[in-house]
Image: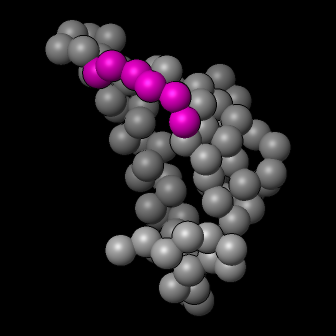
Protein backbone atom coordinates (compact mmCIF):
# COMPACT_ATOMS: atom_id res chain seq x y z
CA UNK A 1 0.00 0.00 0.00
CA UNK A 2 1.19 3.52 -0.76
CA UNK A 3 2.11 5.66 2.20
CA UNK A 4 -0.16 8.66 2.50
CA UNK A 5 1.01 11.50 4.72
CA UNK A 6 -2.02 13.73 5.24
CA UNK A 7 -1.89 17.06 3.38
CA UNK A 8 1.66 16.49 2.04
CA UNK A 9 0.91 16.25 -1.69
CA UNK A 10 -1.80 16.44 -4.33
CA UNK A 11 -1.32 13.05 -5.91
CA UNK A 12 -1.25 10.11 -3.50
CA UNK A 13 -4.27 7.90 -2.99
CA UNK A 14 -4.84 4.73 -0.99
CA UNK A 15 -7.64 2.23 -0.52
CA UNK A 16 -8.98 1.14 2.84
CA UNK A 17 -11.73 -1.43 2.60
CA UNK A 18 -14.02 -0.05 -0.10
CA UNK A 19 -12.94 3.56 0.50
CA UNK A 20 -10.61 5.52 -1.72
CA UNK A 21 -8.71 8.26 0.08
CA UNK A 22 -7.10 10.95 -2.06
CA UNK A 23 -4.55 13.29 -0.58
CA UNK A 24 -4.46 17.02 -1.18
CA UNK A 25 -2.52 19.89 0.31
CA UNK A 26 -5.71 21.63 1.49
CA UNK A 27 -8.19 18.74 1.79
CA UNK A 28 -8.46 14.97 1.78
CA UNK A 29 -11.21 13.29 -0.23
CA UNK A 30 -12.77 10.09 1.11
CA UNK A 31 -15.29 8.28 -1.03
CA UNK A 32 -16.70 4.83 -1.57
CA UNK A 33 -18.44 2.38 0.70
CA UNK A 34 -17.32 -0.43 2.93
CA UNK A 35 -18.77 -2.77 5.49
CA UNK A 36 -17.08 -3.24 8.81
CA UNK A 37 -18.06 -6.79 9.52
CA UNK A 38 -18.09 -8.49 12.89
CA UNK A 39 -15.02 -10.60 12.18
CA UNK A 40 -11.23 -10.35 11.84
CA UNK A 41 -11.53 -8.74 8.39
CA UNK A 42 -13.83 -6.05 9.80
CA UNK A 43 -11.44 -5.45 12.67
CA UNK A 44 -8.57 -4.95 10.21
CA UNK A 45 -10.56 -2.40 8.18
CA UNK A 46 -11.67 -0.55 11.33
CA UNK A 47 -8.10 -0.37 12.63
CA UNK A 48 -6.75 0.84 9.28
CA UNK A 49 -9.37 3.60 9.14
CA UNK A 50 -8.68 4.57 12.75
CA UNK A 51 -4.91 4.74 12.13
CA UNK A 52 -5.39 6.95 9.11
CA UNK A 53 -7.86 9.29 10.87
CA UNK A 54 -5.51 9.50 13.86
CA UNK A 55 -2.77 10.69 11.45
CA UNK A 56 -5.14 13.33 10.05
CA UNK A 57 -6.03 14.54 13.55
CA UNK A 58 -2.40 14.73 14.66
CA UNK A 59 -1.46 16.63 11.49
CA UNK A 60 -4.31 19.14 11.87
CA UNK A 61 -3.74 19.60 15.61
CA UNK A 62 -0.05 20.37 14.99
CA UNK A 63 -0.92 23.33 12.75
CA UNK A 64 -0.07 26.51 14.66
CA UNK A 65 -2.38 28.74 12.64
CA UNK A 66 -5.12 26.44 11.40
CA UNK A 67 -7.79 28.61 9.73
CA UNK A 68 -11.44 28.37 10.72
CA UNK A 69 -12.22 27.30 7.17
CA UNK A 70 -10.31 26.61 3.95
CA UNK A 71 -11.17 29.16 1.24
CA UNK A 72 -13.71 27.74 -1.20
CA UNK A 73 -15.05 25.06 1.14
CA UNK A 74 -18.68 24.84 2.18
CA UNK A 75 -19.60 25.99 5.68
CA UNK A 76 -19.75 23.15 8.15
CA UNK A 77 -21.55 23.19 11.49
Q: Is residue 64 magenta?
A: no
Quarter of the C terminus within the rendering: bottom left
Q: Quadrant of residue 22?
A: top right
Tell me which secondary structure the magenta stretch mostly adopts.
Answer: loop
Residue span colored magenta: 31-36
The residue at 18%/14% (across/down) is 38
Question: Residue 25 placed where, x, y %?
Answer: 74, 62
The residue at 76%/40% (across/down) is 12
Q: How are the colours assigned in the image?
A: one colour
The residue at 60%/38% (across/down) is 21
Q: Nearer the viewer, residue 31 or 39?
A: 31
Q: Is residue 4 left or right of residue 34?
A: right
Q: Nearer the viewer, residue 13 or 35?
A: 35
Vertical placement of residue 49 versus 27, above or below: above
Question: Residue 32 placed where, x, y %?
Answer: 52, 28
Vertical placement of residue 57 versus 74, above or below: above
Q: Nearer the viewer, residue 31 or 52?
A: 31
Quarter of the N terminus within the rendering: top right
The residue at 32%/11% (across/down) is 41
Amino acid sequence: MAVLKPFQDDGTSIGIGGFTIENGTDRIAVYGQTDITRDQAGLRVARELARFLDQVIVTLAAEKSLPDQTPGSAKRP
